[in-house]
């Protein structure tokens, strides 16, 4: 796996620092020159932004669907069953990264884009045809179909920018990931208005046509630049080293525990607003407000991580996110809920964006960065799969006992922060 591909989701400063420390850097890597710009480079970044807009942006908007399904089309089903739809989406987006990233490294970028776009768009249009109170149709179209398409598209769309940028990787990664926040602002506003004005089917169809335009455009403008990686037989020694790296696994478990509860407020905040009789304006825009704050949470921490290292930034942001969940319990008034949404959107967005650079920062060789990121995303996907359904069970509708699911969220996020704190301390001690 080439350095450029590996470092696409890693902290640029950390990865380059390790290059300089290496006694015998790979000659073919050292000889690579990066344009650091140009029309094709920025078109590729724009295409990645479009794909992340459609994929991760849609996942972060699931709170709108959770609220609509709970109160309208799937009202007879428990909230935990409904949250499985969104959780399966996140599971596939993260877990398939282990495989799509490897295929990308070996030259299958165009194939992944075409296949992933087709599966995602086909499933999205099928979602517009589902019948009310047919849970399995929503689950298959939105959870499985769209989730698989997302998983195929997501990691390659992030990685390809590293073919063009080295010094500016932190900036370009932040720009691409920020596409998810823009999508997560636009989708909730569109859906909340369209559900009322044109109904569920046409609302989803209109969003699907927007996705069709963006994904076709991305397929047309994105290009790879470097030759695919060749099999060099070093994967076995890399895996042995990684599986023996206790500090790395502490960080992975920390990220997994944090993500186990991190999306609970994001999935349930609109339902929380409606159950506490917030105004219609706040209810319709609260998910968008949270995700708008996440836009800055995905860019500012990436810049900070270039200066101080990703573990130095993700650890306090995780602990603050866990503490903020307790605040949501008291945010039953309009002003308090909006303030919570802004703060939680920023800090939780930072945790999500820094997960990959943090896991990559433990690499001792640039050739294992992609493997470490893939392992982290795969392990974390199981926490993302189960966290929101557990919260749905603890919610006990129609009584809506918010204390239990939010305690679960806060404790898991803080527990993940504690693991990260230990890993950060040991990492710093190991470097000195």
Image (tube, rainbow, N blue to C red):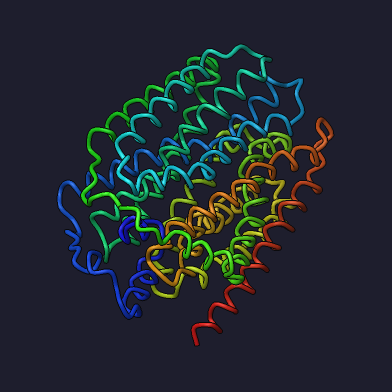
Residue 54 vs 171, above or below: the answer is above
Q: Which image quadrant: the N terminus?
A: bottom left
Left/right placement of residue 196 relative to residue 152 reads: right
Q: Nearer the viewer, residue 330 or 148?
A: 148
Query: Considering depth in this image, is 346 or 142 the residue closer to the camera?
Result: 142
Q: Position of residue 227 (x, y in %)?
A: 23, 50
Q: Is residue 286 visible?
A: no
Residue 246's place in the image compared with 205, above or below, is below
Query: Which residue does the image show at 25% across and 65% down from the upper left?
Result: 29
Q: Is residue 88 left or right of residue 104?
A: right
Q: Please state the horizontal and vertical placement of residue 23, each as a whole percent of the image.
A: 32, 80
**Residue most toward the bottom?**
432
Q: In this rendering, would 201 be left or right of 132?
A: left
In this view, the residue in front, 300 or 44, is 44
Could you tell me which residue is drawn at 69 percent across and 46 percent down?
A: 333
In percent of width and height, residue 210 lies at 37, 26
Q: Is residue 163 above or below residue 153?
A: below
Image quadrant in which you'd find residue 199? top right
Q: Specify whether residue 118 is in view.
A: yes
Rendered image quadrant of residue 9: bottom left
**What percent of the width, then of the height, locates residue 62?**
57, 35
Q: Residue at x 29, y 41 (%)?
A: 47
Residue at the location (23% across, 55% down)?
Answer: 164
Q: Is residue 268 left or right of residue 398?
A: left
Number of numbered discs on residues: 0
């Amino acid at each position: 796996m080439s350095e450029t591909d590996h470092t696409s989701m890693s902290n640029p400063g950390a990865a380059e620092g390790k290059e300089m420390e290496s006694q015998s850097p790979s000659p073919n890597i050292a000889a690579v020159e990066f344009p650091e710009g140009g029309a094709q480079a920025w078109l590729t970044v724009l295409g990645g932004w479009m794909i992340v807009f459609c994929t991760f942006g849609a996942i972060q908007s699931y709170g709108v669907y959770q609220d609509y399904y709970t109160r309208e089309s799937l009202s007879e089903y428990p909230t935990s069953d409904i949250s499985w739809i969104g959780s399966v989406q996140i599971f596939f987006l993260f877990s398939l990264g282990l495989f799509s990233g490897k295929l990308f490294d070996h030259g299958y970028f165009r194939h992944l884009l075409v296949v992933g776009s087709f599966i995602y768009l086909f499933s999205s249009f099928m979602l517009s045809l589902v019948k009310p109170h047919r849970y399995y149709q929503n689950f298959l179209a939105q959870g499985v179909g769209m989730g698989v398409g997302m998983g195929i598209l997501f990691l390659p769309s992030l990685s390809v920018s590293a073919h063009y940028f080295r010094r500016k990787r932190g900036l370009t990664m932040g720009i691409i990931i920020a596409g998810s926040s823009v999508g997560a602002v636009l989708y909730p506003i569109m859906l909340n208005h369209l559900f009322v004005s044109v109904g569920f089917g046409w609302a989803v169809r209109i969003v699907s046509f927007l996705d069709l335009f963006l994904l076709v455009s991305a397929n047309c403008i994105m290009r790879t630049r470097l030759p695919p990686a060749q099999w060099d037989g070093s994967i076995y020694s890399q895996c042995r080293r990684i599986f023996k790296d206790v500090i790395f696994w502490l960080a992975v478990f920390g990220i997994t525990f944090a993500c186990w509860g991190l999306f609970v407020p994001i999935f349930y905040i609109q339902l929380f607003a409606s159950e506490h009789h917030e105004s219609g304006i706040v209810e319709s825009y609260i998910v968008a407000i949270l995700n708008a704050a996440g836009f800055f949470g995905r860019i500012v921490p990436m810049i900070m991580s270039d200066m101080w290292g990703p573990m130095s930034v993700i650890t306090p942001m995780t602990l603050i996110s866990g503490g903020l969940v307790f605040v949501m319990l008291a945010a039953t008034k309009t002003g308090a809920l909006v303030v919570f949404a802004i703060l939680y959107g920023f800090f939780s967005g930072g945790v999500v964006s820094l997960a990959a650079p943090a896991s990559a920062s433990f690499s001792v060789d640039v050739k294992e960065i992609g493997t470490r990121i893939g392992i982290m995303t795969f392990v974390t996907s199981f926490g993302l799969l189960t966290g929101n359904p557990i919260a749905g069970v603890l919610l006990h509708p129609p009584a809506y006992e918010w204390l239990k699911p939010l305690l679960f969220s806060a404790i898991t996020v803080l527990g993940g922060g504690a693991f990260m704190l230990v890993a950060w301390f040991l990492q710093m001690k190991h470097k000195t």
